[in-house]
Image (cartoon, grey):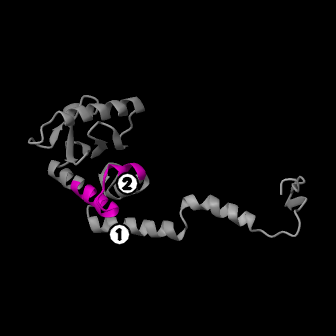
Amino acid sequence: MIQAILVFNNHGKPRLVRFYQRFPEEIQQQIVRETFHLVLKRDDNICNFLEGGSLIGGSDYKLIYRHYATLYFVFCVDSSESELGILDLIQVFVETLDKCFENVCELDLIFHMDKVHYILQEVVMGGMVLETNMNEIVAQMEAQSRLEKSEGGLSAAPARAVSAVKNINLPEIPRNINIGDLNIKVPNLSQFV
């Protein structure tokens, strides 16, 4: 089972942190720091598997990582997971990000965090691998984007509500609003209009 997914840059700044096991926030930050230091001190010529740090479970857990440009993608897994399978999963995740963002970079992870989390949830949920077919993941992402566009996006909802209220043509401002047992007296607003 996947215990955590960490993505951080070459300086140790976390860009994506997802824990599938409950840890207090201070412990999570220590795990990110310890994982960064364990991965950073490894040479590029050695394998991408190492035993988990003391905070995440020691020898029962493995850290499997890949280094792409300025980002480290680290999956912390228990001993039941296949190292090569997780390396392939990291590759699928990165290639899916690359397809969705067209040459993904660190800034995409920063400014499109919602999409990155959506893609991750299509791949892994609750620490279990859901989907490894990149085309299926991209298709679901595109379907989600179409749905958001058809609804106008959540961010556009307040603006639509304000414009709808402004476009109401009332011959005069009501003084009393009655809704069932609820009576609302509207103050004189003519001085503000």
| Looking at the image, residue 168 lies above or below residue 108 | below
Tell me how far mark 1 sits from mark 2, CA to CA. Answer: 15 Å
- For the C terminus, the image quarter is bottom right
Horizontally, residue 122 falls left or right of residue 89, namely right
* Residue at image point 17% right, 33% down: 41
Instruction: In the rendered structure, find residue 139 and report the number of the disc placed on it.
Output: 1
Q: Residues within 10 Å of mark 2 (few under 14, many from 20)?
A: many
Label 2 secondary element: helix
Image coordinates for residue 155, horizontal then vertical, percent: 56, 58
* Count of numbered circles in the view: 2
**Dividing the picture into quarters, in which one does residue 46 lie?**
top left
Say which residue appears at 34% left-offset and 63% top-offset. Answer: 100
Between residue 150 and residue 71, name the one nearer to us: 71
Q: Main secondary structure of the magenta part?
A: helix
Query: Between 99 and 177, which is closer to the camera in this rendering?
Result: 99
Give the residue type at disc 2: Val
In this picture, is 192 found above or below 173?
above
**Disc 1 versus disc 2: nearer the observer:** 2
Magenta stretch: give its range: 91-111
Q: Nearer the viewer, residue 163 or 16?
A: 163
The amino acid type found where label 1 is placed reads Ala
Residue 1 left/right relative to 180: left
Secondary structure at badge 1 equals: helix
Crowd tier of the residue under label 1, counting other residues whose Cα lies within 10 Å: few below 14, some 14–19, many 20 or above: few
Inspect this view and state whether residue 5 appears: no
Q: Which residue is label 2 attached to?
A: 116
Residue 193 — which label?
Answer: none
**Above or below, comparing residue 40 to residue 164 in the picture:** above
**Is residue 56 left or right of 147 when viewed as pictured?**
left
Residue 113 x, y percent position in the rendering = 41, 51
